[in-house]
Every structure is written in C-alpha cells, then in structure tokens.
Amino acid sequence: MAASTLTEVARLAGVSPATASRVLNGSARTPGPDIAERVRKAADSLGYIPNAQAQGLAKSSSGLIGLIVHDIADPYFSAIARGVQTAARHQNKMVLLATTAGSPADERAAVAAFAARRADSIVIAGSRSTRTSDRQGNAELAAELDRYCRNGGRVGVVGHAVVGAESDEGYHVVEVPNEDLAAALARELAASHAGEFVIIAGPEGLLTSDDRVRGFQRGLADAGLPPADVLHTGFDRTGGYEAGLELTARISAPGGSRGAGPDAGYPRLCIFAVNDVMAIGATAALRSKGLRIPRDAAIAGFDDIETLRDFRPALSTVRLPLEEIGRLAVPVAGSGPTAAATVGVTGEVTLRRSTEPAGEPAT
Amino acid sequence: MAASTLTEVARLAGVSPATASRVLNGSARTPGPDIAERVRKAADSLGYIPNAQAQGLAKSSSGLIGLIVHDIADPYFSAIARGVQTAARHQNKMVLLATTAGSPADERAAVAAFAARRADSIVIAGSRSTRTSDRQGNAELAAELDRYCRNGGRVGVVGHAVVGAESDEGYHVVEVPNEDLAAALARELAASHAGEFVIIAGPEGLLTSDDRVRGFQRGLADAGLPPADVLHTGFDRTGGYEAGLELTARISAPGGSRGAGPDAGYPRLCIFAVNDVMAIGATAALRSKGLRIPRDAAIAGFDDIETLRDFRPALSTVRLPLEEIGRLAVPVAGSGPTAAATVGVTGEVTLRRSTEPAGEPAT
DNA sequence: AAGCAGCGGGAATGCGCTTTCCCGATTCAC
DNA sequence: GTGAATCGGGAAAGCGCATTCCCGCTGCTT
C-alpha cells in the first residue's frame, strides 16, 4: 500500500488535483472555504503526505540545506551544525549532512551531491587549505561551487572564501577575525609571561591555522617579543598530543632560552595551540609526562568549544560564537542574488587558569 | 542558466534520452561502447548532474537516510551521528538531519518530513519516554512510523522500540543492555565502596534512564545493599549540575547514614549519574562547592562519550560503542521486509579514578 | 533459405505535483 | 441591460528522469 497521492485526495474530495494542490499548500489562490474544508478532510482521512520530491521537481527547489563539515563528532563542528540546524528550522528546511575529513575532493563530491538534490543552499564549514597538494582539488571544488551558484544556488562559507572561487553571486562568507583575535591573545599573554612562546599549528597551508599563527606572531611582535617557534602537526587532538610530547622534551631539558623554567618562578613555555582540541591533546601529552599546567607550561587554545566548559585546568582560549556562526552561515531564504557578501562575527580573548602565572595555588 | 538535463546531453550526443539514461546510470542494459563514450563525453562537456529529485520520483527511492537526534551538539549523539554517516556513505546515501530535543511531537513531524522526502530509511536515536504527558505524542509517533513502514520504509531505533509501535516490518532496534550493564557497574562499585549510593536519574519515564536505574538498583541488591536514593532531574548537563548541587548539601551535612564521611576514610557518597554529561555536570557542581572527587564523593557515569577522554578526574563509566551503534542502526539497503528485528551491542564497565577509594594520592 | 531468438536503440508513458491557461459564472460599472 | 472585469474551478502541460514496450536488425538453427 503506497502512500496516497494528491490525485487520490482530490478524487475523494470530488475536486480536481489543481484545486487540491491549491488548498493543501500555500498557493496564491485560495479556493472557497467549503471546498478547502472538504479537501483538508479528505487529505487527513487518507493520511496524505505530499511527496517532497515531486514538489521539488515541479517547483525546482527542495527545501534542503547542505552542510559540509570535516567531522560531525568534533565539538567545533557540531556546535556549528547546531546553529545551522536552528537556522534551517526557521526557514522550514531540512539539513543534509556531508562529512569530508577536509578533503577537497570529497567536498567537491558533496557539493555535486547537494546540487543533484537541488539543495537551496550549501554551508561549508571547515577550514580551506592552500596546500599545493590540494591545488587541483580546490580548483575543482571552486568550479563545482561556481556552477552551483550559477544555477541559482546560494553558498555560505565559514571562515574563508573558497580558494579560487570566481562567482560573487549568492556566495557569502562568515568572516572570523582569526588573525586579529590571535594577535590580541598574544598581547595579553605576553603581558604576563616571561617565558618562551611556542605555537602548535595545523598543517602548513591550512588557512585558519595560518591566520592564527600569523596573528599570534604579530601580537608577540607588538609586545616587543621575538617570534615563536612553530610546530606543524595535525589539526586535531592527535596532532596536539604529538606536538605536546615533543614539547615535553624541550620543557624538561636543562637550561633553556631566556633562563626560564619551573624554578625561575614563571612558566618556561607558553604554548598556543591553534584550536582547542589541539590544546586539549597537548595538555594530555604534557600531563602524561608528569608535567603540570600552568606550573610547568602555560597553554592556550582557540574556539572555546563547549567541551572546555568542564575541562581542567580551565583553558585560556578565544571564545568564538560557534552556534551563531552556524546560524549566520546559512544563506537567507529569499535573498536576492546580491546578498550581503560578508558578515562578520567577533570573538573574545578568554583567559583562564591554564595561562595564569605559575606558582599560584591550585583551585 | 539552469543546470543541464539528460535530454540536452542526449541531444548533444545524438542519441535518445533513453539511451543516455542507460549509459549514465547503472542500468541493466548497457548500450554499445562507442555510444556510451559519446554520451559520457557529452555529459561532462555539459557538466551534467542528474537531478536526484527526478530520479527519485521516477524510481521512488531517494538515497536519503533520515536521522533523528535530540541535539546534534551533544557528544553522545554526535558520536552516533558519525556512525550513521559512515554507514550512509557505504550505502551511497546521504543523511538528513533532524533535531527534536526529545519531543515526541517534533519527532513525529520529523518522521513525516522524512516520509515526504521518501527517505529510504530512518534512524531514531535518543531515548523514548513513557511519561503520560507524552502518551499522545508517542502514539502519534508510532502511527506515523507504522505508516512509513507500511509504505516500504525501514526504521532503525537506538535503544528501545518506539512505545506503541505495531508494525514489525522493516523495523529494527539496536538493543543496548542498559539494565545489565548498570547492574554490573553497581556490583563493581559495591565491592569497593562502603558509603551510601545515590542515583542521579533523568526524568521519570525516560526509558534509558529508567533501565539504568533499575539495573543499578538490582546490582546493589545483588551485593546485598539497600536501594539507592534516586534524584530525578534533566537528562543533560544542567540536570546533573542541579542534582550535584543538591547532593553537596547532603555530603557536607554533619553525620550521615552509615557513619561514612571524608574522615571515615572512604567516600561518603557514591554517585551514579545515568549518563556521562550528567555525571560531568554533577562533578562540576561538587567542585564548585569545594568538594573533591573521589575524595569527598565517588562518581560514575554511563556511555563513555569521547569528551571523557580528557576529563579530569577520569570518570568511571560504562563504555558503549556509540559509533558502532550508529552504524548498526542504519537499516541495510536491500534487506528484505523481514530484516533482523534486533541487533545487540554490548558495553563494558570501565572503572577510572573518579571511583577509586578515597585517600589515594592524586595523579 | 526461411524462421526465430536476441540485441541495440528509440518512442512513449508515468512518477506526483505545480502552474499556466482557459472557461463559465458572477459581479460591477456605466 | 449590456459590456467588461473578476472570481472559482478544471484541463493540461510540463518538471527530469526511468522504464516498458516496440521495432528493425544480426546471427543462429533446422
């Protein structure tokens, strides 16, 4: 027993399919109240559910929003996803999920799939990369997106414009001032840390990572400090952990630049991990070697993911309104082709215990 | 410039739409190699992307998997979502996301929306409830699901069968032995804790919560202990936090049943929160009042969400293979109407520092 | 050599719905 | 009271694709 169709409803109500369609969906023309009543009654006596595929085909629009993330179980992305979901609900749309682990090729495929489903708009969260190994992938992704836009699709990107994107139609980006915020963080840290600074960064070429690194270095320079060493590693917890292990050696080594160290009364090292999950990984690594934070090293992250709320030691970070970012990233439904090209959000440096000067009593 | 259609491709290739369709999609009949080549070339010179809506309409199947969760940003659900996503990818399908905050009415609406989109299958994660206030909602949800199944849909449910579900066609549940695992946890804890036991539970009527409570009590009974007090609260971090606050009073109160207490050398209280986020909330509450874990209270959760990996004190819990659960919950694509009704997974009691006997040196 | 199965391709139909177009019946203005 | 404008409803044409049916052809059997 297949689902009942509009035609069946119409027949049962004794009207034409056209009329039934008009009453059951908000058409411009509203049939008479008596007829409307009959149709509605017929509809729910049959348990009629409109076939969204057919509707989409006829109206060429699907009520779908495509969301592309690296990994839905990553707190950063799931917070954004929540925002996207909220916005979608306000627009009476559903969200289609694609996870790509950051591979441009997969992202291209996801865009194509969304296009095939005639998604009304696409949201791309997750950092862009300029690695040469991704060049071709990026180009293809950009091409796919352009085509999608030309066909009337709207796309919202979190963070950076897609590398090589041409179209400016229906393409908007939620800009996160990564560089400025990282600089601000660096300045604040520089004020209270005499020790050496080290940055745990993502792979070279990852835009978000690069921006934050650049900003942090600029902030240090502003404070009259030399640039920090940069360790490139994976953009996830594992990367942070590995870098953390590497740093433990440096921390435990006798002596060290600028004569800092646990016994000097302030942290030998101040570590900036370009995102929170990496900071968490690094913290775990240090802890596994018996080092304490902030006693033996200060550490700060970026994003302020929800996980941090209960993480000890409380991690200093830069708070980003992730959910709002998600909400803002979904293109507004009926917006004209010249929708706002860019919306900005702002963050906030949030200092917590992990970067307090050493020697304070633990809470 | 609208997206190009099969007909355009066919015309460019100088063949009929039928032939073009046959070569571009895996049809039973494969046209000659020369023709196929021509069509394929025409297709990608035009950047042809098949219209999934039209395909779906014609084939009446959509390549969509609907996923219903309470909150995608909750680590428990996002872990399951990851598993679902993995399974979907293996089936060459995409996942449609709906979040409902656990409201049966919203879940019904989500099922209807999925049905409208002709989703091939639906996965419902998130606990079922038997609260009387949800009675009608549950009934309607069950009815909606039954209709969906009768129309050929497949549904997979995590945890419990939907209350009141009739159909046994295309309906399968991933069963989690919540009760037994909770009992096992209780027995292990009983062996090392002399103090009083308290359970922080979700709202009464929430099946998952009820099962775990029942199991835990049974485990205590097995060990010859009296039943634990049960605090009912929200099934989320906030609920855990509030319950935790309430418990701090009890812990700090002078005296106490069975004469336990910090100075007695073992924890006064052993708290079992029915899920990890609640346990985290409770921990935060205790800590906010200056209490230490496990010194002043032992605490255990359930699920072993990924967040726990870096949570301190390391929380005892029951490990559930969440991602696998997600994978298993996705109905297999071509399975006959009499697909396996139930698949089981198993968990593992995982004792960590949060329930170690007090007095041990902190790590 | 005639007959038949088999194959490669095209014409046509339908999936379920929206939407234009059309037509008879009112209502309004003059 | 007649014309035009309006309203309420139905007929029909797609939306883009899959698929059934049909037809002309080749290659085989007897």
Image (spheres, coloured by chain):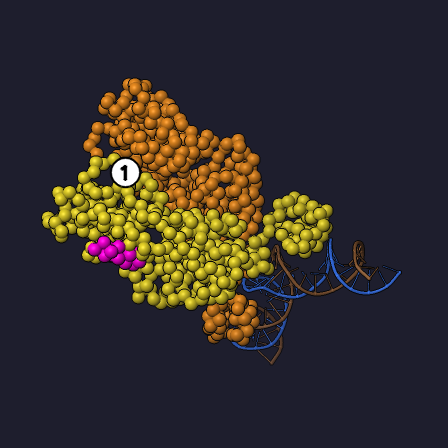
Chain colours: A yellow, B orange, C brown, D blue
Which class describes the residues within 10 Å of circle 1: few (<14), some (14-19), or many (20+)? some
The one nearer the camera, A240 or A28, is: A28
Residue at 65% over, 55% down: A28
Q: Nearer the viewer, residue A286 or C3?
A: A286
**Direction from residue B228 to residue A261 in the image, left or right:** left
Identity of the residue drawn at 62% across and 50% down: A4
Compare residues B238 and A267 and report the one nearer the observer. A267
- B55 relative position to A41: left or right: left
C19 lies above or below A273: below
The reply to whether residue B157 is in sight is no
Q: Is residue B219 above or below residue B88?
A: above
| Amino acid at the residue labelled 1 | Arg
Instruction: State which quadrant residue D10 falls in.
Output: bottom right
Q: Is residue B303 left or right of residue D28?
A: left
Q: Secondary structure at mark 1?
A: loop
The residue that label 1 is drawn on is B312
